């Protein structure tokens, strides 16, 4: 049984979606977190070292960070094919997109959000617009990041786009709108949304 430490309307919401997609047995442990607007507080019941979500516990193993959780769950529960297995021709691209999300996209978006403008981007990642151009080129060949195959990488990217598209960080385009609609139109997304608030 997987335990997901979760706070509604946060990055952990997408892991209810992923748990539904992989068909894992799970329970949700609702915790409070510090919010970006200054509300909330660290919850003593949350084992995350920084009081954040998501975090999963599985048979005494603690896993946190979105890309790590996605890889852990899709490797452990391969039945529905949401994560390419070792030896699959798309495994390399899958690992790359998980790492790209954590190591390139999120830092680039945070730089944009903080209005930090470094010519050519920061060491280690490009400006947000350049990173999004790479995602856009990939989705033009789509319909998913791995071509015709939906994966957990699409859950990370698609749910993030659903939150921020149309705002100052991410302009809405017909391509991105169609991608978000494909991701959020999945039955597992609806089941997860029903459990988000508890």
Image (cartoon, grey):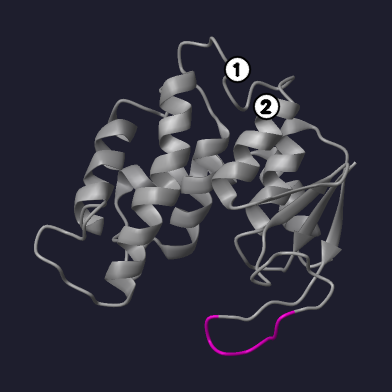
Q: Is residue 175 above or below residue 164?
A: above
Does residue 56 appear left or right of residue 27 in this picture? left
Label 1 crowd bin: few (<14), some (14–19), many (20+), radius 10 Å: some
Residue 164 seen in the current view = yes
Q: How many marks?
A: 2
Say which residue appears at 46% left-offset and 11% top-offset.
Answer: 89
Q: Locate residue 118, reporting x and y percent.
A: 14, 68
The numbered dot on residue 5 is none
Q: Secondary structure at mark 1?
A: loop
Q: Is residue 123 magenta?
A: no
Nearer to me, 139 or 90 = 90
Say which residue appears at 79% left-offset and 69% top-offset.
Answer: 46
Choose the circle earlier in sequence order: 2 or 1: 2
Q: Is residue 1 above or below residue 3?
A: above
Q: Quadrant of residue 35?
A: bottom right
Nearer to me, 101 or 9 = 101
Q: Locate residue 111, reporting x and y percent.
A: 29, 68
The numbered dot on residue 85 is 1
Q: Locate residue 52, reporting x and y percent.
A: 65, 68
Q: Secondary structure at mark 2?
A: helix
- Give the residue at mark 2: 75
Residue at the far left in the pictured view: 119
The rendered magenta stretch, by its main secondary structure, is classed as: loop
Q: Locate residue 82, reporting x and y percent.
A: 62, 27
User: Do residues under tags 2 and 1 come within 8 Å of each other at their CB atoms?
Assistant: yes
Q: Which portion, as a residue range, is magenta?
A: 36-42
Residue 146 seen in the current view = no
């Amino acid at each position: 049984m997987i335990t997901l430490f979760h706070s509604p309307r946060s990055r952990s919401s997408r892991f209810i979606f992923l748990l539904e997609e992989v068909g894992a047995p799970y329970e949700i442990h609702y915790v409070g977190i510090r919010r970006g607007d200054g509300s909330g507080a660290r919850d003593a019941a949350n084992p995350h070292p920084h009081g954040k979500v998501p975090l999963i516990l599985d048979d005494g193993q603690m896993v946190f960070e979105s890309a790590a959780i996605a890889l852990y769950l899709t490797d452990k529960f391969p039945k529905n094919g949401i994560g390419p297995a070792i030896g699959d021709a798309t495994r390399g691209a899958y690992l790359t997109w998980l790492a790209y999300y954590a190591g390139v996209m999120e830092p680039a978006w945070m730089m944009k959000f903080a209005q930090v403008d470094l010519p050519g981007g920061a060491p280690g990642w490009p400006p947000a617009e350049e990173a999004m151009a790479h995602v856009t080129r990939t989705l033009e060949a789509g319909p998913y990041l791995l071509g015709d195959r939906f994966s957990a990488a699409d859950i990370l990217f698609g749910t993030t786009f659903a939150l921020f598209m149309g705002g100052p960080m991410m302009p809405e385009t017909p391509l991105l709108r169609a991608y978000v609609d494909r991701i959020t139109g999945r039955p597992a997304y609806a089941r997860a949304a029903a459990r988000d608030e508890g």
